[in-house]
Amino acid sequence: MTLATTPPDAALAELMHDMGARARAAARALALLSPADRTRGLNAVAAAIRAAATDILDANAKDMAAAQTKGLSAAMLDRLALNPARVEAMAAGVEAVALLPDPVGRELARWTRPNGLDIARVAVALGVIGIIYESRPNVTADAGALCLRSGNAAILRGGSESLHSSRALAGAMRAALKREGLPEDAVQLVDTANREAVGHMLGGLGGAIDIIVPRGGRSLVERVQTDARVPVISHLDGLCHTYVHTAADPAKAVAITVNAKMRRTGVCGSTETLLIDQAVAPALLPQIAQALQDAGCELRGDARARAILTGIAPATDEDWATEYLAPILSIAVVDNLDAAIAHIERWSSNHTDAIITQDESAAETFLARVDSAIVLHNASTQFADGGEFGFGAEIGIATGRFHARGPVGADKLTTYKYVLRGTGQVRP
């Protein structure tokens, strides 16, 4: 159902609950599909996105024009923008999800009890997943595809700034499923900018929604965590750190740091703070800083960093706590590994943190003690991406401990049930 105007509250409530009922029916139908059926649907969706590329780009142009008029930040504009390459990447991403092993029906464990009962733990879909996200239209394709692969129905609520783009994408996806004789309501878009729609989703739509996934800034995630009446898989901001240890290879330190910050500054895996050991900072920090500045990065530093890099702005507590999503990097010179870990423990959002070192013992200490969803050794934090993990795509990077952590791919969008097979056993 397409909404041309913002409906009154009563009409919106009715619309949202109808979406929930249709999603629940679609989820039941998806549970009966074979893995081949879901694969067929995904490949049809990928083809439909390619075929609708012109319409999708035209819709995105409307969103971009409105966003520029509103004065959205460069990072938000980058997340919102589509071009032919990005549309193709979305279609290819859906095809990559189609190639993944189907997670539904996996036998996770099996054993036989002394009384002869055969017990299996089997993966099943979560059911209906509500995804609330900001700006990025590609989430419409990624989330819809991952839910379909895992046998879940998706109710998608994108940001108002991406409404035209998401509408074009969701329309193409639904049409493809319908042509294949599959439940088109497996993918539904909340087609209104009315913010009250989010409240209805957080209420669970009368029990229709099984889980909520927020994907966006801290204010969105905090609202979802506070108001949701259904379980939440949280995806907080990416306050990521790269730590250059005293035993770092200088060439790796420069290359990894520049990539971690500047490859794409608007993604959640972009490094926001550089930590560097005092022992190597006088010689190595100027090299790293020059490469960053040559790439267009603004630097801010603590007192020790500014003593080495004269002319950079001071970093404050606000900087250590800020996800810039822009070409800005804060730098702290630390005494040693313990001090670096202490800084991360205080300021990290537990998303992604990296160490650069040739000292295997130091690396293992860092990997064991830093309690983030993703920790890396001698690699860029920009690898915080489901596609780079081989998941095809991700519904987000979960930073909590409930149900899933790190890139949430199709296999994490399942739960399980126990299947017991007997031969007439009764309990004494």
Image (cartoon, rainbow, N blue to C red):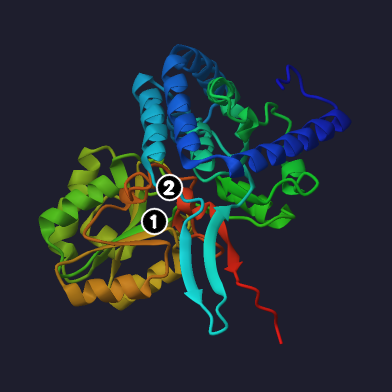
Q: Which residue is mark 1?
A: 240
Residue closest to the eye, 58 or 115: 115
Q: Is residue 34 above or below residue 286?
A: above
Q: Is residue 408 something one can see in this rendering?
A: no
Q: Secondary structure at mark 2?
A: loop
What's the amino acid at mark 2? Answer: Cys
What's the amino acid at mark 1? Answer: Cys
Q: Quadrant of residue 353?
A: bottom left
Left or right: 396, with 203 as reference point: left
Q: Residue at x 45, y 52 (%)?
A: 238
Residue closest to the eye, 331 or 255: 255
Neighbourhood count class around disc 1 (C-alpha, 10 Å): few under 14, some 14–19, many 20 upward:
many
Q: Is residue 225 something one can see in this rendering?
A: yes
Left or right: 61, with 420 as reference point: left
Ranked by sequence position, the earlier of labels 1 and 2 is: 1
For the residues labelled 1 and 2, say whether their Cβ atoms are less than 8 Å apart.
yes
Q: Which residue is mark 2?
A: 268
Residue closest to the eye, 149 or 65: 149
**In the displayed image of the protein, which residue is found farthest to the bottom?**
428
Q: Is residue 146 above or below residue 273?
A: above
